[in-house]
Structures are given as structure tokens and as C-alpha cells.
Image: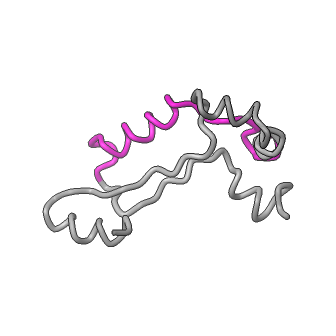
């Protein structure tokens, strides 16, 4: 079920539904990808995005903390894209094909 539909269905029961969509986050798997056969493409993607780097697990956790805390009580039905601007650069910036 999509997050927006789930927000309506589960909202009737008092739940909030959100999604976090991270880009490249530095984990052991990401390190392998960055040094593997496709690493050049991944590195170019990171260098061409506004933030110029990969994310960290702590940064993802911070967004999760906000969404689950009282400070995020008014957020529901949202997909939080946190990719350092890679998607924006793909459509509007230097990564545009």
C-alpha cells in the first residue's frame, strides 16, 4: 500500500505513515559499491550533487527520529527523499542526461 493511502487508512486509527527514501548512505555495502566495477559512476553521481557526498546512517536516523517524535506529529503520508540532491541534479543540474 502506498504511503499516502496508508496514511488515510491508518490515520483513522491514530497512526502516522511516512517513508524515508535514502540515497547512497555510507555502509559496508556502499563502500563495496563505491570501490567496485560501478564505483566510478556512483562517485560521479555524488560529486555532481549539491551536497557533494554520501549520507551517513546517523543522518537517516535523525530523520526517523523526527518522524517518530512529537515534533513530527503533523507529518503523515510523506515520502522523505534524502539523497543529497542527487535526484534534483539528475533532473535539473549537472547529472542531467
Q: Is residue 57 above or below residue 21?
A: above
Q: Say which quadrant the N terminus sits in.
A: bottom left
**Furthest residue to the left?**
13
Judge whether residue 54 is colored magenta: yes
The residue lying at 63 percent from left, 41 percent from top is 24
User: Where is residue 21 drawn, in percent x and y?
Assistant: 51, 51
User: Where is residue 90 drawn, in percent x and y?
Assistant: 76, 59
**Front in this rendered view, residue 72 or 18:** 18
Q: How many marks?
A: 0
Judge whether residue 90 is colored magenta: no
Res 8 → quadrant = bottom left
On screen, residue 80 versus residue 11, left or right, reads right
Q: How has the structure been colored for display?
A: one colour
Res 32 → quadrant = top right
On screen, residue 72 versus residue 80, left or right, reads left
The residue lying at 76 percent from left, 56 percent from top is 89
The residue lying at 75 percent from left, 65 percent from top is 91
Q: Is residue 62 above or below residue 50?
A: above
- Please provide the residue range marked out in magenta: 47-73
Q: Say which quadrant the C terminus sits in.
A: bottom right
**Front in this rendered view, residue 64 or 35:** 35
User: Where is residue 78 drawn, in percent x and y?
Assistant: 42, 60
On screen, residue 79 versus residue 77, left or right, reads right
User: Where is residue 47 drawn, in percent x and y?
Assistant: 81, 40
Res 12 → quadrant = bottom left
On screen, residue 54 versus residue 3, left or right, reads right
**Front in this rendered view, residue 62 or 55:** 55
The residue lying at 61 percent from left, 31 percent from top is 26
**Front in this rendered view, residue 69 or 46:** 46
Amino acid at each position: 500500500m502506498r504511503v499516502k493511502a496508508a496514511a488515510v487508512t491508518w490515520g483513522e486509527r491514530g497512526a502516522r505513515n511516512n517513508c524515508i527514501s535514502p540515497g547512497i548512505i555510507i555502509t559496508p555495502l556502499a563502500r563495496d559499491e563505491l570501490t567496485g566495477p560501478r564505483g566510478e559512476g556512483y562517485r560521479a553521481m555524488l560529486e555532481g550533487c549539491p551536497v557533494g557526498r554520501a549520507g551517513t546512517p546517523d543522518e537517516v536516523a535523525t530523520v526517523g527520529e523526527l518522524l517518530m517524535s512529537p515534533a513530527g506529529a503533523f507529518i503523515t503520508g510523506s515520502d522523505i527523499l534524502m539523497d543529497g540532491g542527487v535526484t534534483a541534479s539528475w533532473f535539473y543540474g549537472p547529472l542531467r542526461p
